[in-house]
Image: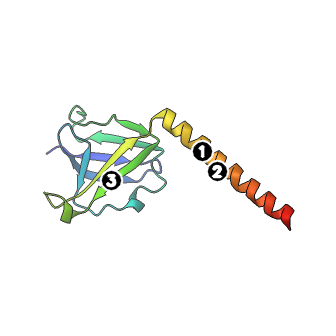
């Protein structure tokens, strides 16, 4: 049976994953939580045990990925932990950076107004 290994930006690996053919849902016998992915998705490498990635909907490397969903065994037909990743498109990533900067500027401006009021 073909399995997949995911290597995160920090070198952490998830191994022995299976995948719905042509789909993007990974299956794991081991517990998967949001902490598994936290801070590790800037670069994600995916490799098939036989080297053939044609059945995988993902490229072999994701940049700026995000966790879309985790499903617990009680919610899956085969009783495995399942998860979906996606690569954040460049324009969406750029927009998020701008929004983060604006939020920071607004917070700094609010702090300045409060300091001036004192």
Q: Dots 3 and 2: beta carbons under 8 Å?
A: no
Residue 4 percent coordinates (x, y): 26, 45
Secondary element at tag 3: strand
Q: Please name the residue that numbered disc 2 is placed on.
A: 103
Q: Measuring 51% from the left and 39% from the top, which residue is drawn there? A: 93
Q: Please name the residue that numbered disc 3 is placed on.
A: 69
Residue 39 percent coordinates (x, y): 49, 54
Relative side of 79 to 91, left or right? left
Q: Dots 2 and 1: beta carbons under 8 Å?
A: yes
How many marks the image carries: the answer is: 3
In the figure, residue 29 lies in which quadrant? bottom left
Alpha carbon separation for disc pair 3 and 1: 23 Å
Q: Is residue 5 above or below residue 34?
A: above
Q: Which image quarter holds the C terminus? A: bottom right
Secondary element at tag 2: helix
Q: How crowded is mark 2: few (under 14 residues within 10 Å), some or many (20 or more)?
A: few
Alpha carbon separation for disc pair 3 and 2: 26 Å
Q: Measuring 21% from the left and 37% from the top, which residue is drawn there? A: 50
Q: Residues within 10 Å of mark 1 (few under 14, many from 20)?
A: few
**Depth-wise, is mark 3 or mark 2 nearer the camera?**
2
Q: Which mark sits nearer the N-terminus, 3 or 1?
A: 3
Relative side of 1 to 110, left or right? left
Q: Is residue 79 above or below residue 55?
A: below
Q: Which image quarter holds the N terminus? A: top left
**Depth-wise, is mark 3 or mark 1 nearer the camera?**
1
Q: Which of 56 and 116 is in front in this view?
A: 116
Q: Is residue 57 above or below residue 104?
A: above
Residue 57 percent coordinates (x, y): 27, 36
Relative side of 21 to 59, left or right? left
Q: Please name the residue that numbered disc 1 is placed on.
A: 99
In the figure, residue 71 lies in which quadrant? bottom left
């Amino acid at each position: 049976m073909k399995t997949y290994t995911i290597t995160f930006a920090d070198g952490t690996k998830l191994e022995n994953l299976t995948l719905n053919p042509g789909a993007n849902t990974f299956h794991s016998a081991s517990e998967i939580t949001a902490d598994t992915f936290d801070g590790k998705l800037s670069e994600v490498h995916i490799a098939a045990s036989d080297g053939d990635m044609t059945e995988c909907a993902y490229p072999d490397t994701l940049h700026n990925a995000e966790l879309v969903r985790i499903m617990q065994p009680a919610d899956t037909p085969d009783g495995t932990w399942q998860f979906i990743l996606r690569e954040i498109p460049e324009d969406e990533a750029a927009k998020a950076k701008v929004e983060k900067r604006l939020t920071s500027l607004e917070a700094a401006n609010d702090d300045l107004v409060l300091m001036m009021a004192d």
